[in-house]
Image (cartoon, grey):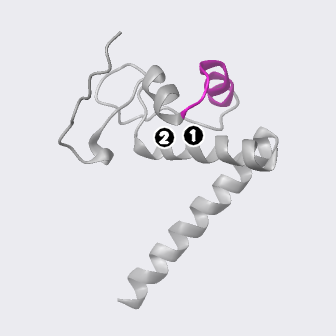
Amino acid sequence: MSDTTVIIDAPIEALWFDLDDLCRLGVVEACWLEQRLADGMLLACPEAPDTTRCYNALTLARVRRLACLERDFDAVPELAALVADLEEELQRLKDRLRCLED
């Protein structure tokens, strides 16, 4: 196996990841990821460019956040998902408030 660096000239929002990419980039095991998908804590993107299950940058960020919460705070998966949901909602509200102030 070679360590070849690939440079992709695209915004991360435009990139799609398969399950293997998501595991590698999220630094999680496949069984960890598949369990969170089965439990509904993570979702495939319905607007994916083809019929295979694909994931976007938002899903990658959520994978990393869930793994971090579980690891750093020894949180059960359900609690980590709840905290991530609350953080995402807080960010959406901050963004709306910022738009209203402009």
For image coordinates 23% across by 29% down, the residue present is 6
Bin the neighbour count of mark 1 within 10 Å (Cα to Cα): few under 14, some 14-19, many 20 and up.
many
Nearest the eye: 58 or 97: 58
**Percent position (x, y) of residue 67?**
65, 40
Identified by mark 1, the residue type is Val
- Dividing the picture into quarters, in which one does residue 83 lie? bottom right
For residue 76, above or below residue 39: below
Q: Nearer the viewer, residue 69 or 91?
A: 69
Where residue 77 sits, quadrant-wise, is top right
Residue on which the image places disc 2:
60
Along the viewing direction, whichever of 10 and 1 lies nearer the viewer: 1
The residue drawn where x is 32% and y is 47% is: 13
Residue found at the very far bottom of the displayed protein: 101
Was residue 30 drawn as part of the magenta stretch in this picture? Answer: yes
Q: Residue at x 66, y 19 (%)?
A: 31
Q: Say which amino acid is labelled 2.
A: Leu
Magenta-colored segment: predominant secondary structure: helix
**Mark 1–mark 2 contact, CB under 8 Å?**
yes
Q: Position of residue 16 (x, y in %)?
A: 34, 33
Quadrant occupied by the C terminus: bottom left
48 sits to left or right of 97: left
Magenta stretch encompasses residue 14: no
Q: Which residues are magenta?
A: 27-38
x%, y% of residue 46?
Answer: 42, 34
Q: Residue furthest top?
A: 1
Label 2 environment density (alpha carbons within 10 Å; few <14, some 14–19, many ≥20): some
Q: From the viewer's perspective, is residue 56 above or below residue 99?
A: above
Q: Secondary structure at mark 1?
A: helix
- Relative depth, front residue between 13 and 9: 9
Q: Where does label 1 land, which residue?
A: 63
Q: CA distance from mark 1 to mark 2?
A: 5 Å
Q: Number of marks in the image? A: 2
